[in-house]
Image (cartoon, grey):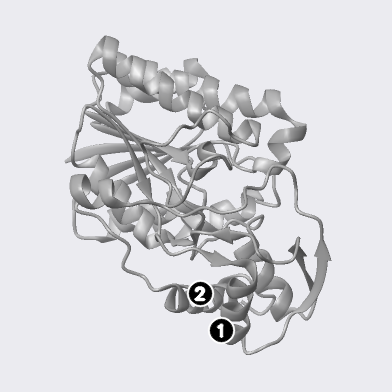
Amino acid sequence: MKTILVTGGAGFIGSNLLSKLLFSGNKYRLVCVDNLDELHSYSAKLKKANMAPFAKNRNFIFYKTDIRNIGALKRIFKKEKPDFVVHLAAKVNPRLAVSDPREYSSVNIGGTQNILELAREYSVKNVVLASSSSVYGNKNKVPLSEEDRTDYPLSPYGATKKATELLAYTYHHNHGLNVTCLRFFTAYGENNRPDLVTFKWVKNILENRPIEMSGKGKRERDYTYVGDIVSGIIKAMNKPLGYEVINLGNSSPLSLQELLALIERATKKKAIIKFRPSHGASVEKTFADIGKAKKILDWEPRMRIEKGIAKLVSWYTKNRTKNA
């Protein structure tokens, strides 16, 4: 039975990945490492709720550990001997990174250094590392290709993700470590992070509270269903590639206004809108070129955005409302 260590497994993408791996019929041992921090409106209570469906599964084990704690991590690697590592743990809010860059560097770069070093030391077969479309900034034409320059991220968050990609390359070059860096494009869906616009808008509209619309609602994002992200992670995990950087996106961007129309349709309610200026760390448009993912991983998104938003609203109603 293969052992997979997932950092950040109690979070949004991590919990969806663990659920898929545990209940898909494949036999894996899943080792979840998460410190259950409570920043960005994401409480430990919500993260524990994410893990509740599989917390008692005999093939699942949880360690409450910070990825900056190299001693604790080393004890986990030594005991569990993972075949694969999926490294999702990170500080992930680009705006908050502007005001707290040291914390983002400490977790995202320092923590990733620990994961890569232990993966090398314990001969992990393959590492999948979560990167972000934030590395692209605003300087590139769209769609955004892995060949584009990534020298101008707008937030320290994007800078840390670029740094982790470079670190990963050095571990491949010097130690032969297999690392695939996946650049995620605006994930949404079940177990959605509370600080993301998709969650906040669904919540506020259902509760008859105003939503915030930045700028004039023209900014575009390539919203990608979390189930599609998870399928890409699994494909990358099972296909060691040496070193690669690959986009995972829906390749069909929507403006904030278009996203709102879909949420209003799914909730059957009209939003109360308050406009605010755009944040300086917010890029104007993300749009993934997924040709490389199709060619190398045989991956492409399958969830239409209309259906995905409906699934998000249904999940929220059943799991996050006062009556849930």
Query: Disc 1 marks which amino acid?
Result: Ala
Name of the residue lying farthest toward the bottom: 268
How packed mark 1 is, by other alpha carbons closer than 10 Å (few <14, some 14-19, many 20 or more), is some
Quarter-of-image position of residue 5:
top left
Residue at left offset 35%, top offset 15%: 170
Q: Identify the residue position indicated by label 1 in the image.
A: 266
Q: Is residue 36 above or below residue 162?
A: below
How far from the left and from the top, in percent, is residue 32?
A: 41, 40
In the drawing, does residue 306 fall left or right of residue 280? left
Q: Is residue 73 above or below residue 293?
A: above
> Of helix, strand and loop, which one carries label 1?
helix
- Kindly indicate whether the residue at mark 1 contacts the one at mark 2 (C-beta within 8 angstroms): yes
Residue 257 is marked as none
In the drawing, does residue 42 fall left or right of residue 111? right
How many numbered badges does the structure rendering display? 2
Residue 309 is marked as 2
